[in-house]
Every structure is written in structure tokens, then in C-alpha cells.
Amino acid sequence: MNPQDVDVAVTGYRVARREGVWCTHPAFGLLLTLLAERVRSIRVHAPQMPEALATECDFTLDDRRISVFPWPVRVNSIGALRHPLRLLRQYRALVSSGDVVFLRGGGPMIWSCHWMARRTGKPVIHWLISNPLAALPAAQRGYGRLVEFAGRGYARLDAAMLRLGLRISRAEVIANGREVAALYRCPRAKVIVSSTIRSSDFHDRVDTCTGPGVRLLFVGYVRPEKGIEYLLRAIPLVRAAVPVHLAVVGSWEEFPAEKDRLARLAGSLGVEDRVTWLGHRAFGPGLFSQMDASDVLVLPSLSEGTPRVLVESRARSLPVVATRVGGVPDSVTDGVDGLLVPPRDPDVLAQAIQRLIEDGELRRRLIREGRRRVQGWTVDAFVEDLVGLIRGMTANVPPPR
């Protein structure tokens, strides 16, 4: 079957209804839009985003080949697990609606999709995003010790069931980094570095840190596992000849208590006037202009897959400092196209930031090599890989009459 005759059933990110049109996260929406140009249709089955978080869904799914089948509003996985039978019905509708099933990330009981697909003979592509067994213990999320302890137990069970499901469905697996591939015991998994960037989004710049101050940038959700606390603690330890400021780009509506805690910490460290909380910035010109106005991208995470922001920032000629966790080493090679440091260590993090500020030759080399390395990690290249998988999985299936 030619991919242009294939209907792809998809789940992977929440959707929101805005001004009469379905929207989703830009990273997911751009992927779906590009994939829709190569197949007959995309059928998106996804929970709806709570209204308070809907600003994250700012990519319009207006391609006529994309249909959205919304599920009830889901705040988190706990809410979905309160209605397991409804969840199973949603997954059954997902699997039955396409010729190929494309699953992005995890989700409560998502392993059941593999069992259903095997029973109905549907091929599955599963894109594994991150390691929940590393993310949950990384930091307390404020749900209470009992709930978080139970959540870790459930995550272990869910991972075991998904490992079994992947074997049952004989799914094609894409993994964000080797750690994720190893967790699910997928030796044939295609290990990738996640990206939303396109060739037209690249920006050439020779150097940074040449102004009257140094502008650090963090981009990501303001969540406990992002390790922002350690970046705040590192700021007063950076001994630079010019002032050092930090801009935090990312929404905190899902974890407002974490934002308040970090703001109080900045005050206690005496750096509150050097930290700016910018909130969500839409992917594209809004985010790129912030990157172009910055000198160093810092990602102090405690747990990660292969963060898109590490690709986006290097494509915009921004040097990066990140923690050596999850799939980050699959994206950044220490000393070649970025600097890697251990997590939870503000002293070493400060030293890496200071090293970039002071060593212009190193900084310019990292910028140059970083931009060169990510040139092949575009979303267009990823879509080409997906189309190749779809073509191979449906090669012996006759086209519909």
C-alpha cells in the first residue's frame, strides 16, 4: 500500500478548542501537519487540555486531512485511571480508526493499544519519549508522599506491561535516546534526538557573551524535575566580570507551587532582581527572538529524554550547558558541541557557565559545532523516517478499493 492510501491513527499530546478550531502543542502539531502531506489522513485521538493550560496548545490543526476525536479533559494520568473502562474504549476507538497506529510517548494503560492492535492486525509505530522510572523519583511533584510512592509503583508496572505490549504487537520503536531504548528492552529501536526545527529556522551567529551583561536562558516547563533550583543556586557562584541575568521561559500553570517555591528561593539567594519569569513563549519567532537575545542556554534537568530545546538553541547559534541525564548525552557531546555537567551540583554548573563566559575560543567552537551537528535533526527528516516505516509496514497490504 502506498503511504498516500494510508489512514494513520495517532495519539500523543492533548488538544484544546480555541476559536472553533482544534489546536495542540507546536512540536506535535507541526509533525502531524507534515505527516498529513504524505498520507491519506491523520486521525488524532487525544484528551482535552484543561482551560488553565490551554495556552500551550497554540498550533492550529487546520489541515483538512487531520481529524480530531477529542477525549474528556485530562489534568493528569491519575484522573484517567479513575475511569479505566472508558480509557480502554478510547484506545479501542483509536486502534480501529486507522490502517497504522502511531503512539507518541506514554500514557495510562497505553500498553493496551498494542494488545488491541495485535488482535486486529494493525501495525504500530511507538515513539518512546522519556523514562518515567527516572522522572518520577527525580523530584517531589507535590502530590503527597503516599500518592507519589504509589505512582512510582504504577510506573514500574506500566513499563513492564508496555515492554510486553511492544513484543506482542511487534511494533516499530523510535526512542529518544539510548536510555529509553534500554528501559523498554528494544534492541532494534531507532534511537533519535527529538526536534521541532526546520532548515529555515536556522540562524547563524559567530559569538555570544560580548555585551555589557551575560543573559542566561532556560526554556522548559517549570516543574520540579527540571532542576531550576540548582540553576538559581549557581547564579551567585558565577564570578563574571559583567552582570549575569537569567530569563526563564516556560509555563508554570501545572505546578504553581513550584514557581512560588523557586521565586522564594531566588529571594533568599539575593538574585530575585536577576531572574525574569517570562512564562510561555510560542514556538517560532517568539521563542527564537528570545534565544537570539540570549548568550547561553542552560538546562539543569534531573531527568530528560532528548530535549528539543537543545536542538533548537544550537540551531539558533546559542551555546548550551546541560546536565548529563537521560538522553542528553545522545544529543550533546561534552566539549564538542556543548558542555555537560552532573545534575544537582550548582558549583559545577556555575563553573561550566563561567568557563563559557571567559573562554571565547571554546564558546565560538561550541556554537559552530553545535549548529553543524543539528543540521540533520530536522522535523522534516523525522517525518521522512516515519513515512519510510509506514511504507515498509504496509508494503504487502493491498490498497483499498
Image (tube, rainbow, N blue to C red):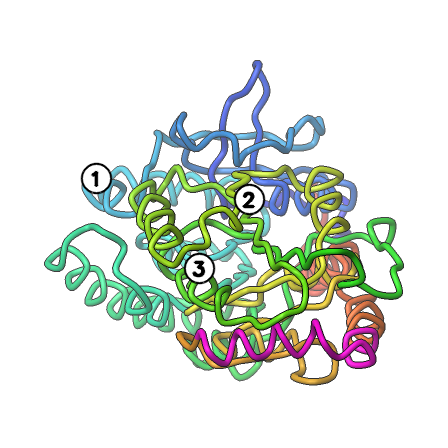
Tell me, yes or no, whether the highlighted magenta stretch contains residue 250: no
Indicate which disc, 1 or 3, sits on the residue closer to the N terminus.
1
Residue 377: x and y in percent read 75, 65
Q: Which residue is mark 1?
A: 83
> Which mark is on residue 9?
2
Residue most extreme to the left: 146
Q: Amino acid at mark 3?
A: Ile
Q: Secondary structure at mark 3?
A: helix
327 over 294 or under it: above or below: below
Q: Amino acid at mark 2?
A: Ala
Please say whether residue 89 is visible from this viewpoint: yes
Q: Is residue 39 left or right of residue 190?
A: right
Please say whether residue 401 is visible from this viewpoint: no
CA gap between label 2 and label 3 equals: 36 Å
Judge the density around disc 3: few (<14), some (14-19), many (≥20) Cα neighbours within 10 Å.
many
Q: Main secondary structure of the magenta part?
A: helix
Q: Secondary structure at mark 2?
A: strand
CA gap between label 1 and label 3 equals: 34 Å
82 over 315 or under it: above or below: above
Residue 248: x and y in percent read 54, 49
Q: Is residue 358 left or right of residue 164?
A: right
Judge the density around disc 1: few (<14), some (14-19), many (≥20) Cα neighbours within 10 Å.
few
